[in-house]
Amino acid sequence: MGGQVQQPSNAPHYDHSMSSYPGLQAGDVSDAAMARWLQSAGLQHLASPTASPSLDPRHFPTLLMQDYARHGLQNFEDRQKLFRLMKSMGGGMEPGVETFSPLNYGSGRRNGVDGLLSSELHGDIAGGILDLHSIDDVELLSEDIGHEPFEVSPFATVTERGFKNESEDLWLTNKVPNNKQRSQTENSSLRSSSFEKEVPAKDSMMNLARIKVVVRKRPLNKKEIARKEEDIVSIDASGNSLTVHEPKLKVDLTAYVEKHDFVFDAVLDEQVSNDEVYHVTVQPIIPTIFQRTKATCFAYGQTGSGKTYTMQPLPLRACNDMLNLMQHPTYRNQGLQLWLSFFEIYGGKLYDLLTDRRKLCMREDGRQQVCIVGLKEFPVSDVEVVKDYIEKGNASRSTGSTGANEESSRSHAILQLVIKKHSNKKEDKGGKLVGKFSFIDLAGSERGADTTDNDRQTRIEGAEINKSLLALKECIRALDHEQGHIPFRGSKLTEVLRDSFVGDSRTVMISCISPNTGSCEHTLNTLRYADRAERIIKE
Ligand SMILES: Nc1ncnc2c1ncn2[C@@H]1O[C@H](COP(=O)(O)OP(=O)(O)OP(=O)(O)O)[C@@H](O)[C@H]1O
């Protein structure tokens, strides 16, 4: 699996397949048509005359993953888009045929693929799979920003280019990075940033999907390997679908396997590094934080599935990119300052993780703005300092031990990065909020359902966690249906996140799954939670 694109077994010969290229007539591959076609897939930057070497659809049937970088496909999403283009050319598939889940998910997807193949050329390439092209044409203004939006610099160029680093090479060549390589790449990615020189244009930022659902599968751990458990999750090379092979027994006790297929915006296999997770999930949203957006990224999944492992590195990388963007001429003299706070919700109560778990209290002001009284915010201008804050906060978190994880989180931990604009005026004490990114490491999803545990405290924890996860799903549902009423009051978690859901918001949900046989039921539950969230979005 991971990384290597499988070549279609019956890849079309160039001469015969041209008529099936959207907008291209056989023998008439004009640059303009090529550009329009790439544009329809959100890959317009590859059509530029400066893109070298330029892409030629005749080479698609033989294009390998290792060729992607050479053609300027630097990031994961571009590769997914191109892969889908190649698929749509007939690489062993009937147009419009996709993997469908038994839950009948994907009926909308068929339309999307048909849209791509229409002569209009305006079809949404992903049909909502990677809904990066859907345009939010109603730009909701957040209630608490009184000032004008920042102008995008005339120097700004549209770019979706991510940064290429060693971890990406490792991923491409299908090798699992060892610990040394991992720590080297993770440190080097903190020094470099794709935003140092370029700020994406506002239009391209606002084209980002409002809600994105990504699945991450962790590798089998030592205990699971020792127990000879099997890996029952296979990931499609397209990078957006997966199959769970559930072992089952018939009434006559013969064994059989039931397959469950799911499709999401992106599916990351066990070889994908934390850097790549960052590029796919958080990085595209960072510039929007400077444009009055409030973003939320959370990890969901059973205990031991990798939520903390996935979430912990993200704020550090986000800080690095935000600080770099602040140095860009567009923002350098705007009086911007980055602030960090870190707290947890445990048993329905709030605790500041950076001030010895001081108890906090949540209030609403007259404008229904959520205010966490007593929460300490720290100014940040250096990633090393952020590292210390994150370590300190994590050490204060409420953890316990579960069968699957010795260091299991019993709380929801919320790390917020806030950009504020400060002026020299006397009355401007705290600065005005520009944008906010909340990173949430949720407690294990199965705890709420755990009725076998007789410990009262654990049952209270479970009930609270369950309530908040349900409330979170309800809010995402309401948000996506653009309902006037969003049920924030369903739990402390959603109340706290209230201001991240109103106005111009972006949400990324990372569903973490364990691949072993013993976790099958929880894995299916996690995927169904994510699948519902995804379907809510597409309906
Ligand atoms: N993608 C991964 N690659 C390698 N190791 C991983 C990966 N994901 C998780 N792990 C390892 O699995 C173990 C459990 O991960 P983690 O603590 O992140 O789970 P969790 O979902 O946060 O659990 P809990 O809900 O109990 O807090 C850790 O030892 C972690 O290092």
Image: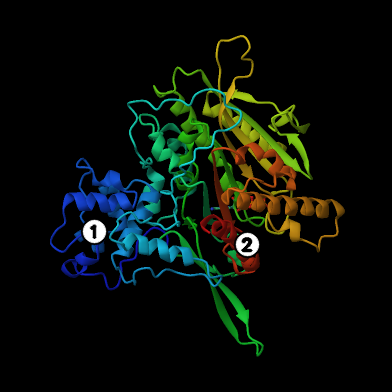
Q: Position of residue 460 (x, y in %)?
A: 82, 52
Q: Position of residue 307 (x, y in %)?
A: 61, 50
Which residue has dot 2 on it?
223
At 44% from the left edge and 40% from the top edge, which residue is drawn? 206
At 40% from the left edge and 32% from the top edge, which residue is drawn? 195
Tag 2: Cα neighbours inside 10 Å, few (<14), some, or many (≥20)? few
Q: Nearer the viewer, residue 99 or 489?
A: 489
Q: Position of residue 362 (x, y in %)?
A: 76, 34
Considering the numbered disc 2 on the image, is that residue within a helix, a strand or a loop?
helix
Circles 2 and 1, Cβ within 8 Å, touching? The answer is: no
Quarter holding the N terminus? bottom left
Q: Is residue 231 visible?
A: yes
Which residue has dot 1 on it?
23
Indicate whether 4 appears above or below 232.
above
Q: Quadrant of residue 387?
A: top right
Give me the C-alpha separation between circle 2 and circle 1.
53 Å
The amino acid marked with disc number 2 is Lys
Q: Position of residue 410 (x, y in %)?
A: 73, 48
Nearer the observer: mark 2 or 1; the answer is 1
Asked if residue 155 lies left or right of residue 326, the reply is: left
Asked if residue 188 lies left or right of residue 20, the reply is: right
The amino acid marked with disc number 1 is Gly
At 45% from the left edge and 44% from the top edge, which residue is drawn? 208
Q: Nearer the viewer, residue 182 or 127?
A: 127
Residue projecting furthest to the left: 27
**Number of numbered labels in the structure image:** 2
